Amino acid sequence: MHHAQLVREYLDGPFLVRDAVAGMTPEQLCAKPILGQWSTLEVVCHLADAEMLYAERMKRVIVEDEPTFGRAEPDACVARLACQHRNLEVELRLIELTRCQMAHILRHLEPDDYQRCGIHSADGRLTLKELLRRVIDHIPHHVRCIGEKRQAFKDAAWKTQPAAVLEGIDGFD
Ligand code: NI
């Protein structure tokens, strides 16, 4: 895939997150309807933290000679970085701004720069292009998880609401 197309896909990511959380109440954002999984707000915070980490990694690959990266610790970050208390809009804007800033950088690289490498402690050598592909795929992966939570809310409503209420829900009348 051409680099310009990759950058366009990268810039589409923040809209996917906004769409995924549109219309959710504060209670729904913090709820954990699926046992053992993060709340929706925690997912969005994880995405914002990951965006900044990925942006830093891409910058280092562009600037440094084969920089090394350690493993990210997403569960520890979500547990320790006040993710249930952070502001949704701030997190969404961070994702957007980080990608906007990086897109300016990515668009001004030479094609060869996309073959520059960093060394990941678990996955080995990654080119800038492979790193960008990973960043792009990260948001759709977590957006699917948010969709599953929203479906779980609907399923719970189906089990707990009396039949008369359900008749008013689309598809049941
Ligand atoms: Ni993730």
Image (spheres, rainbow, N blue to C red):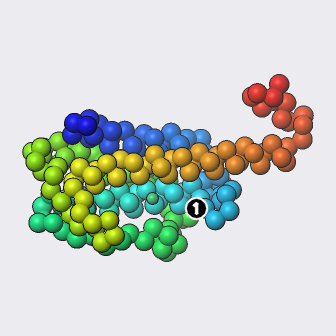
Q: Which of 172 and 91 is in front in this view?
A: 172
Q: In the picture, residue 73 is in which quadrant?
A: bottom left
Is 39 placed left or right of 67 in the picture? Answer: right
Q: Nearer the viewer, residue 150 or 131?
A: 131
Residue 41 horizontal/vertical position (percent): 54, 57
Residue for badge 1: 38
Q: What residue type is labelled 1?
A: Trp
Report the quarter where the C terminus lies.
top right
Question: Image point 76% across, 27% down: which residue?
Answer: 171
Q: From the viewer's perspective, is residue 58 above or below residue 7?
A: below
Q: Which of 29 and 106 is in front in this view?
A: 106
Report the quarter where the N terminus lies.
top left
Q: From the viewer's perspective, is residue 93 above or below residue 54?
A: above
Q: In the picture, residue 63 is in which quadrant?
A: bottom left
Residue 137 horizontal/vertical position (percent): 39, 48
- Other-residue count near label 1 (Cα within 10 Å), few / some / many at <14 / 14–19 / ≥20: many
Is 106 placed left or right of 123 in the picture? Answer: left
Residue at the far front in the pictured view: 124
Q: From the viewer's perspective, is residue 23 above or below residue 49?
A: above
Is 83 placed left or right of 52 in the picture? Answer: right
Residue 91 horizontal/vertical position (percent): 43, 55
**In this orientation, does residue 97 appear?**
no
Q: In the picture, residue 120 is in which quadrant?
A: bottom left
Q: Is mark 1 on a helix, strand or loop?
A: loop
**In this orientation, does residue 45 appear?**
yes
Is 105 placed left or right of 138 in the picture? Answer: left
Ligand 1: quadrant of the figure: bottom left
Residue at the far top in the pictured view: 173
Residue 102 horizontal/vertical position (percent): 24, 50
